[in-house]
Amino acid sequence: MGVDEIDTLNIVLIIAAVIFALLNIASFFGGISYRKKIAEAEFGSAEEKAKSIVEEAKKNAKAKARELMLEAKEENQKLRSVLDAEIKDRRRELSIQEKRVNQKEENLERKNDALEKKEHTLNQKIKEYDAKSAEIDELRRRQVEELEKISGMSQQEAKDLLIRDLEQEARHEAAIMVKEIEQEAKDTAEKKAKNIVATSIQKIAADHVAETTVSVVALPSDEMKGRIIGREGRNIRTLETLTGVDLIIDDTPEAVILSSFDPVRREVARIALEKLIVDGRIHPARIEEIVEKSRKEVEATIKQEGEAATFETGVHGLHPELVKLLGRLRFRTSYGQNVLRHSIEVSHLAGVMAGELGVDINLAKRAGLLHDIGKAVDHEIEGSHVTIGADIAKKYKENNDVIHAIMAHHGDVDAQTIVAQLVQAADAISAARPGARRENIETYIKRLERLEEIANNFNGVEKSFAIQAGREIRIMVKPDVVNDAGMILVAKDIVKKIEAELEYPGQIKVSLIRETRAVDFAK
């Protein structure tokens, strides 16, 4: 193929390409125009639809608004009818209340008128009363003047006479009333108290040991006295120094007396001396060894006795030191009565009486057992055994009721609890039991003389006699000074003074005797 043919072919191809391109461009613009026409047609139809929707919505809204207006009108009408009904009811109630108020006002006006009339009538009566009162006063004054003239006594003198008569009559009636009340109390309280005490005593079964402040040690022969004394008295001095006890070696045949106010020391000395006599080897070194052993033995006995006392009475939970102090009471006596046995007896008695009265039995027993605990160390500590015992109980954290019973068992303080009163009664019963205590003759005579002296110092008492070992005093009164009714008052006064000034076990019966004698002679 030649060059011209190639150029022609290229030109043809180029022209064909140009034509193809022009055709594509024409088809592109034609598509655009077609799409534009279609879009314009669709927009027109959408706009018409929108207009129709808006028109339809407007119609629906107007219809809905009409419906709402109708509903609102109906609701408004209903509310108006309800309010009208309530207003009618309120008006009806107000009308009723108004009528009631008007009626009350009318009633008040009527009552006010009636009160004014009554006040007027009352004022008139008061005036009449004042006038009559003045008239009565005048009549009374004249009557008093006439009575004074007739009787020859002034009004004050008549009053004094009347007061004296009334006072005597009142005293007489008071004495009779006191006697009746006492008799009634005796018929009930005394019988009940005797039953309780009798029951308590019947239930007690205790051994009673009487001891003194001295102990006697028997000797196999009088030759033993010299060995006890030792060369230049060294044995007896050693024994007295180690035990704190006085040894009395006199002409008493085959006996040595140990003297000490401390019963525990005396017991240690007694046991040691008896062991030395049996052993036969009596010299200072052996004495020191035996005394130490005896002291340990006595301490063990003290502990055992204290534990036995708590076991016997059923009192548990005591501090160990209190148990030891109870054991020391085994070697302590009071007027010949063993204090430990006395304490055990008081514990039993208080417990039985508490049971009869429905009181705490364990508390009463505890207080009774510890009431004399101060006597275990009263020779070592200054003060009364009551105060010492209360301090010991406080020290070992005892119950407050127990401490109070210890303080009150001799009347140092007033008994504020039933337990304290029971301990007082039990202590008096145990001490007053025949044979329980011994009293030296000098103290006994002084007590009786003081008892008679107190009775003789009262006005109207002629003579008094203390009998029944001072447990009763019989008093002869002057019949012209003290009448039958006045005897009761005099007896009361004597009892109060005896209670205030004397200390005594148990109780003292005061009996007044009034006798009138008429004496004449036949000639």
Image (cartoon, rainbow, N blue to C red):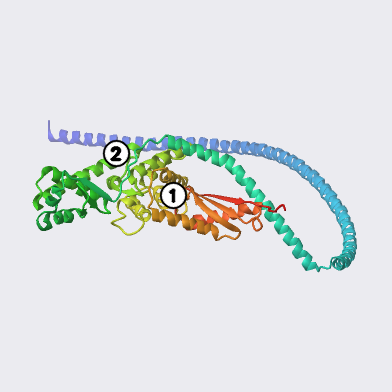
Which residue is located at x 66 percent, y 57 percent? 480
What count of labels does the image hold? 2
Comes first in the chain, label 2 or label 1:
2
Question: In the rendering, at what x and y percent does residue 108 appear?
Answer: 84, 53
Question: Where's the N terminus, which quadrant?
Answer: top left
Horizontally, residue 281 falls left or right of residue 80, namely left
Percent position (x, y) of residue 346? 39, 43
- Label 2 and label 1: CA atoms lie apart by 27 Å
* Amino acid type shown at disc 2: Ala
Is residue 344 shown to the viewer in this render? yes
Residue 505 numbered mark, or none = 1
Residue placed at 88% from the left, 65% from the top? 143
Determine which quarter of the picture holds residue 168. bottom right
Foreground residue among 365 and 436: 436
Vertical comparison of 34 with 495: above or below: above
Q: Nearer the viewer, mark 2 or mark 1?
A: 1
Residue carrying label 2: 308
The foreground one among 376 and 38 is 376
Residue that sits furthest to the front in the current view: 523
Type of amino acid at the residue the image marks with label 1: Pro
